[in-house]
Amino acid sequence: MNRPVRILSPDGAIAPTGTWSVGTRAGDFVFVAGMRGIDPVTNALVDGDEARIRQGFINMQTIAESEGAGLTDCVRLTVFVTDMAALRPLVNKVQEDLWAGGPYPPRTILEVSGLNQDDIFEVEGTFYAPAGPV
């Protein structure tokens, strides 16, 4: 039986540390949980603000790609940072690099007072990835 919602746990993704999954597929859409700059091999935060932001986006990309979606298939991003003035320019720089200058998906960026493990950045995304015939 085909389930309308499928939990994702692809190779190369970070390991969830609690009662959550890294993503789900529902029909033609892939929903990726908030990803941070965690190295999936060591399960530790990477060093450096820009490197950590880039790793968070790459972690999100890994999950999307496991379902046939690329960054250009992203239809919605939500970004959380702990210091808007310092981190938004780095988020913009990393996005410009990864999206090769655009076009960019709709994005909301929010400054929050804290993130898990006292991290500085988290990104979640929704991707369009038609499921095709089963």
Image (tube, helix red, strand yellow):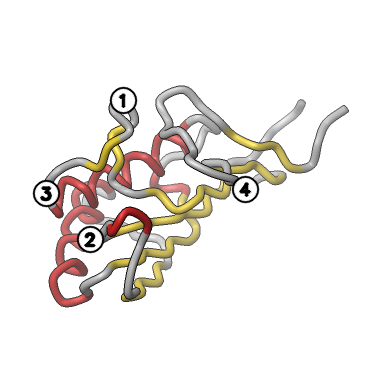
Q: Earlier in the sequence, mark 2 or mark 3?
A: 3
**Type of amino acid under label 1:** Val
Please provide percent x and percent y for residue 115.
35, 62
Please provide percent x and percent y for residue 5.
74, 42
Question: What residue is rendered at 58% in x and 46% in y?
Answer: 20
Q: Earlier in the sequence, mark 3 or mark 4?
A: 4
With respect to residue 107, does 45 lie above or below?
above
Q: Nearer the viewer, mark 4 or mark 1?
A: 1
Q: CA distance from mark 2 to mark 4?
A: 24 Å
Which residue lies under the disc numbered 3? Answer: 48
Q: CA distance from mark 2 to mark 1?
A: 23 Å
Q: Residues within 10 Å of mark 3 (few under 14, many from 20)?
A: few
**Type of amino acid under label 3:** Gly
The disc label shown at residue 41, or none:
1
- In the figure, is residue 34 to the left or right of 87? right
Which residue lies under the disc numbered 4? Answer: 29
Q: Nearer the viewer, mark 2 or mark 1?
A: 1
Q: Earlier in the sequence, mark 3 or mark 1?
A: 1
Q: CA distance from mark 3 to mark 1?
A: 17 Å
Image quadrant assignment for residue 62 = top left
The disc label shown at residue 91, or none:
2
